[in-house]
Image (cartoon, rainbow, N blue to C red):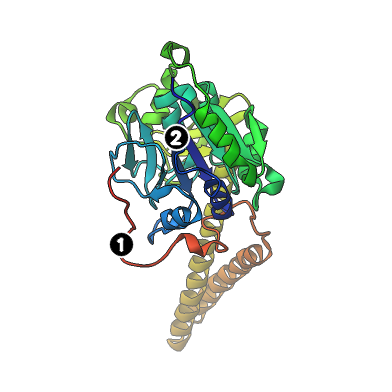
Amino acid sequence: MPGHDIIVIGASAGGVDALKQVVQGLPSDLPAALFVVLHLPAHGPSVLPRILTRAGMLRAVHPEDRDEIRPGIIYVAPPDYHLLVKPGHVRLTRGPRENSHRPAADALFRTAARSYGPRVVGVVLSGVLDDGTAGLLAIKQMRGVAVVQEPADALYAGMPQSAINNVVVDYCLPAADLPDLLVRLAEEPVAVDNPGHWHPPADFEHEADMAELEPEAVHADHRPGTPSVFACPECGGTLWEFHEHDLLRFRCRVGHAWSAESLLAEQTQGLEAALWSALRALEEQAALSRRMAERAAGRGHDHTAHTFRGQGADAEAHAEVIRRVLVNRRPDTSTELFDPAEPEAVETPPAVEKGPAA
């Protein structure tokens, strides 16, 4: 009888330190495979496998697509690829981003839950916003185990706190205490003799397939949830809104997925970009109007010059309003593309470090 031998871990800002604490306490004969998603920049190779290998007794690798799953290996998602768990092997895909991330913890967690049901342990570590919450809920729906880092122990409490707020978490511990728990769970037998008890519902299957851009999922007429009044920040398509317990989520036709908090953060970034674009357009209009006024005045067309000066003054006044909005806007502390405090997780050599095929 297998144990909880599929351990999926999601982390973001502050996650390197937490991951090192987890792996350094795991034995070399751990009867489980680990799968790790850490939010990193899409461009530039990651040295996270090297960091984790040095931190503990298990070998960490960036897997190749369709590598066989083997116990005692840490499979780390490469930058800009979703790491998905299929029965017996992994997939690397460049499917739609979730919560503005690729790789995304939700995609990893959801596919692991679909493939291995109650054998899965989901772990949410330090990070901002809420990637991993929906995936951890999926693991619980499939009778897996939900684990989070104690928020007070995390450098960034957003991700673990969101999981606690929305999921019935089984364990909440400091990172240093997680290795003993994971070893115990890996050795604890799991009854999986009746897969029908954890067969995923249709909407669950649809969301898991979207991470691979499966044609059946993309072309399907049925969409989970109901159409909302919001547009997808990634592609501009209509977002479907659906609720899972108290968790509000959105997904567009081609698969971009958002929590309410992540959607708000992305809209905030989009609003700032729009304001900068408007400021640039108004400044250009003012400059061109002044130039046209000078040309008209030089030709003795005083009335036309006066009209151009008025247009330029209006553009300058509107630009000043937008400039003040940009200067006085409060910083959005909820958004995060990459935590500059963790430069050790990335490097700039020409090729991504690859582990040998498992």
Residue appearing at x 64%, y 55% in the figure: 333
For marks 1 and 2, give the one nearer the viewer.
2
Residue appearing at x 51%, y 34% in the figure: 250
**In what element is the residue under mark 1?**
loop
Residue 17 is at least partly visible in this image: yes
Residue appearing at x 55%, y 25% in the figure: 140
Asked whether, in this view, residue 35 is left or right of residue 351, the answer is right
Q: Image quadrant for the N terminus?
A: top left
* Quarter of the figure with residue 32: top left
Crowding at dot 1, Cα within 10 Å, few <14 / some 14-19 / many 20+, comes out as few
Amino acid type of the residue that numbered disc 1 sits on in the rendered structure: Ala
Residue appearing at x 42%, y 59% in the figure: 47
Q: Foreground residue, 58 or 195?
A: 58
Furthest residue in direction right, as rendered: 152
Q: Note whether 56 is above or below 246 in the view shown.
A: below
Q: Foreground residue, 333 or 283?
A: 333
Q: Foreground residue, 128 or 271?
A: 128
Q: Position of residue 183 (x, y in %)?
A: 54, 35
Q: CA distance from mark 1 to mark 2?
A: 29 Å
Q: Position of residue 95 (x, y in %)?
A: 35, 41
Amino acid type of the residue that numbered disc 2 sits on in the rendered structure: Ala
Determine which residue is flagged by label 1.
351
Q: Position of residue 204 (x, y in %)?
A: 44, 24
What label does residue 132 carry, if any? none
What label does residue 32 carry, if any? 2
